[in-house]
Image (spheres, coloured by chain):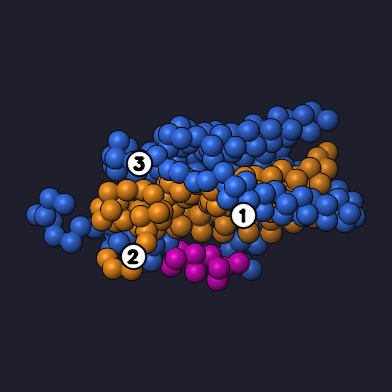
Chain colours: A orange, B blue
Amino acid sequence: MIPIEAVLGLGLIVFTIGLAGVLVRKNLVIMLMSLELLLNGVNIILAGLGRHLNSPRGSIFALFVIIMAVSEAAVGFALVLSYFRHKKSYDTDALNDLKG
Amino acid sequence: MITLAVFSLFGVLAVVSAVLVVVQKNAMHSVLYLAFTVLATAGVFFTLQAEYLGAIQILVYGGGIVVLYIFVIIIVNLKEIVPEQRRLIPKIFLVGVPVLLCAEVVTLVLRTGFPAAPPREDGAGFKEMAEMFLSSYLLPFEAASVLLLAVLVGAIVVARRKHIDDPD
């Protein structure tokens, strides 16, 4: 039997690593990967709580989170590609003008 | 007991490879560690008896998103990336804020008493979940399919070149 505190702690640690990655890194692709880590941490917490409360809602919510993650990755990559064609760079420091 | 051991193994693997995703300089190495994290998370889902979620995690993340990341890194030329620079003090600050947030929430979780889980009969959760997914959550399900269609169209519109015969 897995204690619920361990599951919540694991999810929170993965979430924290992802948040630190989004804040610290400047490479756009690695920032998108860190976003996936954030959503994975949330999914772990949802699955653990669904198991603890003996309810299928945890898995259902986690499935919706996965759908959101896929959408975010697809649109994010389209934006990265279009940005790379303009600037020839991944770095967020080059994102400093409003003109296309 | 053995479930707890397997859970700890996959949990430690997930945390270690998540740290490696963030600290790698080479984006391709980050993607490979991301694949490792995703598979370890799927293992965590299996130990939590969310088998369907684990299978979807392997199929969608391991088979779809990770491959998409690899393609994008191949398409944009890696050699053109300039090394990123950030000063040390803002970096420490930016790592410290999430760590403090995590410590705070962990303290709250440890102080909260969770009621003991009710006993669960095996095999019932899957059927229950499928029925609930297609009855109570039918509207969000349909909304998600509309979202995916919108994402499909939006990604094509954003990523396409303006003129087909334009080399750039």
Question: Which chain hosts label 1?
Answer: A
Mark sitting on residue B1:
none
Residue at the disc numbered 1: A62
Q: Is residue B165 left or right of residue B21?
A: left
**Tag 2's secondary structure?**
loop
Q: Residues within 10 Å of mark 1 (few under 14, many from 20)?
A: many
Does any portion of residue A20 appear in the rendered image? no
- Residue A74: x and y, percent? 40, 54
Question: Which residues, given as a range, are shown in magenta?
Answer: B137-147
The disc, 2 or 1, on the residue closer to the chain's N-terminal end is 1
Q: Residues within 10 Å of mark 2 (few under 14, many from 20)?
A: few
Q: In the image, which is nearer the foreground, mark 2 or mark 1?
A: 2
The residue shown at (38%, 66%) is B150
Q: CA distance from mark 3 to mark 1?
A: 37 Å
- Residue A13: x and y, percent? 69, 45
Q: Are marks 2 and 3 in contact (CB under 8 Å)?
A: no
Q: Residue furthest left?
A: B165
Q: Nearer the viewer, residue B99 or B42?
A: B99
The residue type indicated by label 1 comes to Ala
Quadrant in the picture for the C terminus of chain A: bottom left
Q: CA distance from mark 2 to mark 3?
A: 19 Å
The residue shown at (30%, 62%) is B158
